[in-house]
Image (spheres, rainbow, N blue to C red):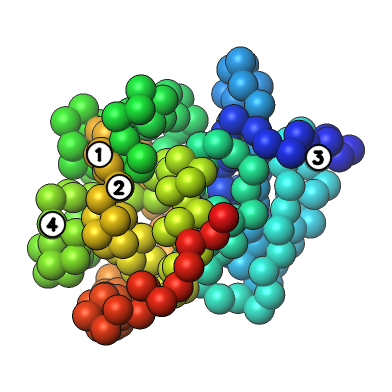
Amino acid sequence: MTTTLATFVDLSIIVPAYNEEHRILPTLRALHEHLAAQPLRYEIVVVDDGSKDRTVDVVEAEGIPFVRVIRQTPNKGKGAAVRLGMLSARGQIRVMSDADGSMPPSQLTRLLAPIIACKADIAIGSRYADGAKSDVVQPKYRVLWSRLCNKVIQRSLVPGIRDTQCGFKAFTAETARNLFARGQIDGWAFDLEILALAKRANFRVQEVGVEWKDDRRSRVNPIKDMVKVIREALTIRRNLRHGVYNQLPAAT
């Protein structure tokens, strides 16, 4: 069953997905259950990033209301998927949320609060800010990977932001169109690029401590992915230095 959506909605949740047939349905069900109880118009936008499994089939067969699927082929990377979702969304507020459900939908209220109060243009769900909680002890390689990213790379591009890689971020529609229309990074470091652009455009960014859970099925490869992030971070720095982003108009 297809649910007709209004031209504009209050909230869009963008869920990038690559080979997520075994994890995505519980995430979508939980999001729908939470949002259906709220007094707002919403949509859940699943961007399939060229999956080789049955991700699209299981989502479409489930028929969850207000869920729509965008297919991106071939596989381009998480950054490209989130960018497509952000620019295709209809919401006045647009949230990126990972398919593994590591951020419970109950945390949306906390994440959106600074934007709703007009105190921020971007809200970042943070695992390190005040109020952050988790009942799960992360594997040591995940902790090391995260800290290395923060200390070696993030701080040189986005000083003052403690958790750039958390896959739970909210943007006003205007901010999302401005930043993602100029994004160039398709891989892991797209967060760094978007936040670096936001800092330079003086958008207000606020970190919000959230309760989160760790998915032991994470596909992070600490060595391989660190190399990718470093390479992409160097590309971002080069683009900033050469004014590449200044030549790209924001979406209207």
Residue drawn at the location 51% of the way across and 37% of the way down: 93
- Distance in Å between CA atoms under marks 4 and 3: 43 Å
Q: Is residue 22 left or right of residue 142?
A: right
Is any atom of residue 114 visible in this view?
Answer: yes
Residue 240, image x and y in percent? 26, 76
- At mark 1, the secondary structure is strand
Residue 250, image x and y in percent? 48, 62
The residue pinned by badge 1 equals 207
- Indicate which disc residue 87 carries: none
Residue drawn at the location 18% of the way across and 50% of the way down: 161
The residue pinned by badge 3 equals 63
Please say if the residues under marks 2 and 3 sit with CB atoms less than 8 Å apart: no
The residue pinned by badge 2 equals 203
The residue lying toward the viewer, choosing from 16 and 22, is: 16
Foreground mark, 1 or 3? 1
The residue pinned by badge 4 equals 159
The residue lying toward the viewer, choosing from 227 and 117, is: 117
**Sequence order check, earlier mark of 4 and 3:** 3
Is any atom of residue 146 visible in this view?
Answer: no
Label 4 Cα crowd, 10 Å radius (few <14 / some 14-19 / many 20+): few
Residue 221, image x and y in percent? 34, 71
Q: Classify 238 as above or below 51.
A: below
- Distance in Å between CA atoms under marks 2 and 3: 37 Å
Q: Amino acid at mark 1?
A: Glu
Q: Quadrant of the N terminus?
A: top right
Foreground mark, 1 or 2? 2
Q: Amino acid at mark 4?
A: Pro
- At mark 2, the secondary structure is loop
Q: Classify 252 as above or below 117.
A: below
**Sequence order check, earlier mark of 2 and 3:** 3
- At mark 3, the secondary structure is loop
Label 3 Cα crowd, 10 Å radius (few <14 / some 14-19 / many 20+): few
